[in-house]
Image (cartoon, rainbow, N blue to C red):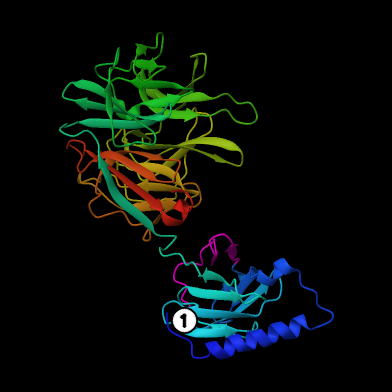
Amino acid sequence: MRKFKFCGLLIAGLACLMFSCLGDGDTTIDDWNLSNAQISSFSLSNDSIAGLSDVTFTIDQVNGKIFNRDSMPYGTVISEKVFCSMEFEIGVLGVLMVSQSTGDSVYWTSDTDSVDFSSPVLITVYPYNNVSSKIYEAKINIHQVDPDSMAWELYSGLISGKSFQDMKVILYDDAYYMYVSEGNLFYLYKTDEADLKNWTETALSGFPGKAVISGITEWEGVLYVVDTEGLLYRSSDGQTWSQVVNAPFVKTLLGFVPENRTGSEAVLSAILKVDETLQFAAMNKDAEWRTGSEVPASFPLSGFGTLNYEMMYQPYLAVSSGRDGTGTLSNVLWSTTDGLFWIPVTKQEATFPACEGAALFYYDDMFYVAGGIDESGTGLNELYYSKDRGVSWWQDTVHVMPEDYRRGFSSVAVDKNNFVLLFGGKAARNTNVLNELWRGRINRLGFGKD
């Protein structure tokens, strides 16, 4: 540290000040206070630096640190000297402030003294006895990353040395269950919710040999899947499966609708084949089925994403994108409150590209659609969002997907630390599953999580 030419004068001045204070007949100082050099409050201000005067500083007396726990916004620049205001446990002889980067020093006397805080500042407080001085390091914390940007990474591989034709990953019983097809066989791998890198193969029993694993659905703690012949199967542990007896011909599982606050029952939503027509239907907890309206020709039967959400205290189930009964790709979000009647929500003048296999998820209080496979059969990497529950969609040009992520049919989840997880996926419609896990998170949603 640079030497200060005024040190001798400073000490002499401090001594004179001390004797002057002690000689005041109206001032009485306890012996223990003669060595008290603690700062009790600290603030900075400069009219040219937005928000600086509103920053709250924490004083760590044990470690001699002064800092703001809530960092100032990303991009804040401390380009000018700032005014420093301090209060002390008891009056002190003097305060010396030294910039750690430049070595410039200031003998602080009042709130009108300005200091360079572009880097940490060492503050030495001299108490009345001028012996046991206390040193603080004061700094302004500024977010070093854009809080609204989204960082994506190829987080890990999944099962090395394997080549799968299809994959579905779901969060079930505090673990991720990965159902895969390899050749004509099905396998199950599991990993702890907090792990994601170590997958253990787990035996399957009674799993249907013609299962449509993309439609595996969890409802009321039970997993359901249908096969290509319309048979419905269930499992209460994800491993041992059995056919649901007396179930109708189930064309497609759509998801579930939770019980609402007025007492409407929770149901499993599906499309049934009834007398050569397709009808919306719902199964209750007693395995009783009710049918609703006929399925419109434009409603997706495969390759759609599903999402549960709530609006005005009413639970909804939504599906988006996919391929309808005529083979046409969809760019519409549909929703239902009972599984029996569905309505198209999306405005055609404000939507995402028609595709199948796009990941639909709820994140940061918005709906998102990620990736997908277009009409040419190739993977997309665009990200679209909706702020009005699927009515209007905009391409997200801030949280851009990586160029290497071009795929559809990924399984999607949002974990407890606000990471979006994209498992597997296909680069093109008729290719094998990519053995990858991608992870992304908006930076501000991670503050205080890691």
Which residue sits at x=19%, y=31%?
A: 164
What amino acid type is highlighted by mark number 1?
A: Ser
Q: Is residue 435 above or below residue 4?
A: above
For residue 92, side relative to residue 191 (left or right): right
User: Looking at the image, is 388 positioned above or below residue 3?
Assistant: above
**Drawn side of residue 298 relative to residue 87, left or right:** left
User: What residue do we see at 59% from left, 85% from top?
Assistant: 11
Residue 414 in which image quadrant: top left
Residue 40: percent from left, percent from top: 66, 67
Number of marks: 1
Query: In what element is the residue under mark 1?
Result: loop
Residue sitting at 24 percent across and 16 percent down?
A: 209
- Crowd class of label 1 (few under 14; some 14 to 19; many from 20; radius 10 Å): few
Residue at 39 percent across and 42 percent down: it is: 360
Q: Which residue was labeled with disc 1?
A: 79
User: Up-down: is 53 above or below 245?
Assistant: below
On the image, which quarter does residue 215 sit in? top left
Front residue (pair 68, 222): 68
Specify whether residue 280 is in view.
no
Residue 215 within the magenta-colored segment of the rendering: no
Part of the protein shown in magenta: 56-79
x and y, in percent, of residue 72 in the image: 51, 67
State whether residue 227 appears in this view. yes
**Residue 62 is inside the magenta segment:** yes
* Outermost residue toward the right in this view: 26
Q: Position of residue 281 (x, y in %)?
A: 46, 23
Q: Assign the magenta stretch its main secondary structure.
A: loop
Give the quarter of the image for residue 357. Answer: top left
